[in-house]
Image: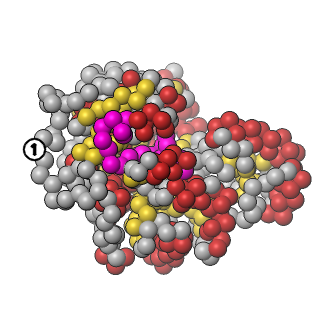
Amino acid sequence: MTNASNPLDTNASTTSFYRPQRIRTVLVANRGEIAVRVIRAAHELGMRAVAAVSDADRDSLAARMADEAVPIGPAHAVKSYLNPAAILAAAKQCGADAIHPGYGFLSENAAFAAQVEASGLIFVGPSSTVIATMGDKARARETAQRADVPTVPGSNGIVLSLGEAREIAARIGYPVMIKAAAGGGGRGIRVAHDAAQLDAELPLAQREAQAAFGDGGVYLERFIACARHIEVQVLGDGKDVVHLFERECSLQRRRQKILEEAPSPSLTPALREVLCASATRLARQVGYRSAGTLEYLFDDTRGEFYFIEMNTRIQVEHPVTEAITGVDLVRETLRIADGEPLRFRQGDITMRGAALECRINAEDPEQDFRPNPGRIDELVWPTGPGVRIDSMLYQGYAVPPFYDSLLAKLIVSDESRPAALARLERALGELRIGGVKTTALLHRALLSDEDVRAGRYHTNYLEAWMTGWRAQLSAEAA
């Protein structure tokens, strides 16, 4: 599949400011908005970008924008985007020098990264060894402790028996979280409030972990009920590491992020410095290369933070960091993979203003977030100063039912948090996506909440808030 006559193919006349050293062609082994994002960055660097596409994505925006689109299998991800053999075959077919995994799918699969390395290709991300170390939560926790980074009180590694779990829970105190060692994205977590619940939940958690991740290992952590979820963005070249400040990701539904912002409204400058220094210290200890994110729980009543895990890939919410620092993270990961050293010292990176990101999903928030795929029959993006859209939509596109429901990310930035909130409210008012139900309605309502506007929220806040919001919607409908 090529795009010689495609009106959306903008690469033909691109003049790059960068001369690639090793990566002439990069295979984008992902889909949706992140595939579009990577293709654009590759084109800006003068690299040829090839889209790996399932049968359901042959007419996607990524396929249209890429220099070439290579089929990798049926619609279901396990036979396409989660199929290492198909992706490696596609890379060979198109003559790729590198594979960019985006986020999700195989992006944090150490075995796949090792296969890419063994085939002589460049994996755009950290080494398979680092992915294996930091992708396993129990091992990452042990690594953090060696780097003198605070961790949530819990087990030292995998819990091997119910008796051991009971002893640990008694020592650290209930409630406790049972977490899949190989989990991610908020999945693979159960909470036990007492010994009887621990007895019931532990074997269930182990079976779920085995089924979902192919690894039944679990570990325990103390459950902090009203913590904030704060993450630090790092960028490394395998020798040096810098941080690009933090993001606040506490507005979550079922442990899935809904709205993110940078910087966090809950940190003092002094605490920010300590938090970010801990992240660079840990990333430097493992010789981190590429973009990565270290996630923390922050107890703002005590001013204490705890490392919980590292995402060894680009994050969905990376644009808010780009907005406050001016650093193109996706472009930098490609340059680093191409053999370039880190271009920044810590003192070169400054923070300007504030930024927020809304995830616009094809879900109906009035019907318990039921997925709502369909054909886009109206599309009006907000524009103006400080407004950015990352999306794979175009008018007439049929949103497939096989994948994550993310349609677009609406990102705004301004000189201050109040100004950014006002800009986001304005931008949401301009947004029009017809043909499918979206979560834009939820975001408009959320921005009217006084606590959200004041930055007074935590990881359990949104769930409670939605109970009242749904009651209000029902009353209005009646």
- Please report the residue visible at 43 percent of the width from the left and 63 percent of the height from the top: 289
Colouring of the image: secondary structure
Q: Residue at x 61, y 68 (%)?
A: 144
State which region is magenta: 90-110
Asked if the magenta segment contains residue 101, the reply would be: yes
Q: Is residue 465 left or right of residue 57?
A: right
Q: Is 112 left or right of 17, judged from the image as shown? A: right
Q: Is residue 162 magenta?
A: no
SS of the residue at dot 1?
loop
Identity of the residue drawn at 59% across and 37% down: 467
Q: From the viewer's perspective, tell me whether residue 132 is left or right of residue 29.
A: right
Residue in view at x 39 percent, y 40 percent: 29
The spot of residue 377 in percent (x, y) is 28, 21
Q: Which residue is mark 1?
A: 13
The residue at the far left in this view is: 13
Closest to the observer, 41 or 179: 41
Image: 347 above or below 474 = below
In the image, what residue type sits under mark 1? Ser
Residue 166 appears at what percent x and percent y? 87, 54
Rendering coords of residue 50 (x, y %): 29, 39
> Does the image show residue 135?
yes
